[in-house]
Image (cartoon, rainbow, N blue to C red):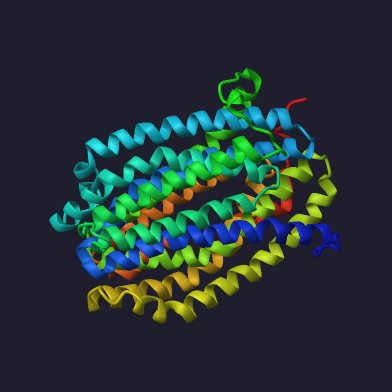
Amino acid sequence: MKWITRDRSYYRSLLTLAIPVALQNLITFLVSFADNLMVNKLGDAAVSGVYMGNQMQTFIQMFTAGISGAILIISAQYWGRKGEEQIRSITAIGLRIAALVGLILAAVCFFLSSEIIALFTDDAAVISEGAIYLRFVCLSYPFFCITQALIASMRSVEITKIGMSVSLLSLFVNIFLNYVLIFGKLGFPAMGVKGAAIATLLSRVVETAAIGAYVFLYDKRLAFRFRHILAANKPLTRSFIKYGLPLTAGEIVWAVNMMCNSRILGGYGAPVITAASVINTLNTLAYITITGLASAVGIITGKTIGAGKRELMKEYARTTQIIFMFVGLFSGALVYLISTPFINLYSGISPEAAEQSMRFARVLSVTIIGTGYQMPCLFGLVKSGGDIGFVFKNDTIFVFLIVLPSAIIAAHFGAPAWVTFACLKCDQILKCVVAAVKINRFNWMKDLTRA
């Protein structure tokens, strides 16, 4: 039994697939970071308003991750069998669902923006700023959903650089428009958080146009064209629903968890909401390498199982666990070391918000160690290996029986905000035990393809 594979193609594939995805995640992070950093000049209410306004973005991001994950996981196995026609059908199914969801949520958020923000906080100033931001940024949802579905289809056939390139373009557009619209440059009026929302909307439109042009006009590997979008394939539609439903449901559970986090921490007031916004950004920064490697492992896993190489997959799984143990430790040390200079970048926030941010960062430096191991192993191995239902059940149990109840109890009895934050993050450590047991039983390798 080998714990470290000597197959050099594994490491080569891991790096060549992970680096572009990690860079894309970094660029996507920088888009949000630019928003936060520029808006922080407007004070705690603006930062908190944008943070609360982005809660629906978190929801749609998670929902879209479920759709994109279904495209990636099922298509990667077909890619191992050289089933390009089936991959095109799966892409079309996912694209139709993603676009429809984006349109529905955009309409709901546009007409009920104030009511939605009021679900997360009672602070009138935060509700006002958040509603302004949400009313405009929600128009970007359909574009975001389409982009993510198309990027997932490219990743499934091992084209990862296009996602990075599209995100880089979006970054430049967003930063430039933020500067112009938030502060009123080049003859435009200063729009504050409304300007940040419009900048995000326009950058998403550019992003969708760029990935669409590549997929429909340039790509030859998958050769997905407009005529494929409306083509029906009932057997694959049933497969997509069968495997995509628990995957999407799992992401929705996680989105509900994140929104409940905001509601629980929102009860502490604007400084704590601001701190949560700052630390959420720091968490995303630490997450970049983890998610890049996880996506790469997912593609390798799907391709290997699809090709029927189960013994080789066991070898890869043992190696993957060791790699991610060190990734988790590195991530924890990184968060601890950069937390102070990172928080100091937010010079416009109040001293109380900065103090709360520092306490949250200390908690995050511990919990991110668990995230670094269990998240990519459960996604890259178990979920991508075909046992999608297990991950959904596991997340549901932890969120609704451990994380949220413990945080609600802590907040109800007046615990400090950092204690409640620790309750909201405790599952990241606890899931490591579950992940280790599940992975080393090797009962998660399932063939999702159709003959």
Instruction: Left or right? Give the position of 394 relative to 125.
Output: right
Dividing the image into 4 quarters, which one contains the N terminus? Answer: bottom right
- Above or below residue 381? Residue 1 is below
Q: Let me know if residue 396 appears in the view.
A: no
Residue 231 appears in the picture as rendered: yes
Q: For the point 39% across and 41% down, which residue is it?
A: 141
Residue 75 at x, y = what percent? Answer: 68, 37
Seen from the viewer's position, the closer of residues 4 and 185 is: 185
**Residue 345, quarter of the rendered image:** bottom left
| Residue at 59 percent of width and 38 percent of height | 70
Give the x, y percent position of residue 163. Answer: 58, 51
Viewer-closest of 23 and 390: 23
Nearer to us in this view, 348 or 211: 211
Q: Position of residue 375 (x, y in %)?
A: 57, 56
Residue 434 rendering spot, x and y as whole percentages: 60, 55
The answer to which image quadrant residue 192 occupies is bottom left
